[in-house]
Image: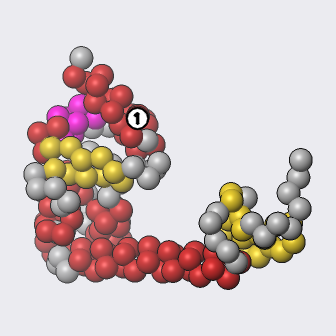
Amino acid sequence: MGVDLVESIYSYGHLIQRTADDKILVDKTETEFKTLEEARTFIKNKNYSDILEEEVTKELYEDITDTRIANIIREHHNVKVTDTLIETYIDLASSKIFTVDPVVQEIRALNKSDKIVEGKLHYELNDGCVVAINEATQITLNNLLQGQQEIIEYMRESKDNFLHVLERIEE
């Protein structure tokens, strides 16, 4: 039961196809697009939008001085602070990845546009979900999960995994 393909193109890392009955598939999933060009334009705009959002977020973090970030790193870790380390922390903070590293949390706190809900820290998980926790929960997680990279990685995967760990902590 194959699909009769008439046309295929790759655009911005996505496979766009038109079937014999004029259905448009993106990455082998049927869409509402009417033409290949419409799908390509949507993907192009979405990619540019994602890139623009990432650049704006990174610029907001770059407004925080390297000296300030270096001081935060020294405050929490006994390491040699280099430009590369500062850049790594800016990338981590702007990615909104779940972490128990207090340096990342403190850098994020300096960026006023980084809070969607006042008093809550939000993280973007690998499954695309966004979770928000209060600062007290974050402190608890920081204390319990230091050095527990496997659990942190598990929590980053999905909302269900994140909530599963929180439920286990509350038991």
* Majority SS type along the magenta span: helix
Q: Position of residue 151 (x, y in %)?
A: 39, 34
Q: Residues within 10 Å of mark 1 (few under 14, many from 20)?
A: some
Q: Is residue 115 magenta?
A: no
Q: Quadrant of residue 114?
A: bottom left
> Seen from this angle, which residue lies furthest top?
171
Q: Quadrant of the C terminus?
A: top left
Instruction: Name the residue: 16% across, 55% down.
Output: 117
Q: Position of residue 90 (x, y in %)?
A: 29, 68
Q: Is residue 140 magenta?
A: yes
Q: Nearer the viewer, residue 123 or 77?
A: 123
Above/below status of 65 relative to 71: below
Q: Position of residue 60 (x, y in %)?
A: 23, 77
In the displayed structure, does residue 138 sit left or right of residue 41? left
Q: Quadrant of residue 86?
A: bottom left
Instruction: Name the residue: 24% across, 57% down.
Output: 104
Q: Position of residue 59 (x, y in %)?
A: 28, 80
Instruction: Name the residue: 20% across, 51% down.
Output: 121
Secondary structure of the residue carrying tag 1 is helix
In the displayed structure, does residue 128 sit left or right of residue 24? left
- Residue 15 in view (yes/no): no
Say what amino acid the circle numbered 1 marks: Asp
Above/below status of 112 relative to 166: below
Above/below status of 10 relative to 75: below
Residue at image mark 1: 160
Q: Nearer the viewer, residue 44 or 150?
A: 44
In this picture, which residue range is highlighted in magenta? Answer: 138-145
Instruction: Name the residue: 24% across, 74% down.
Output: 61
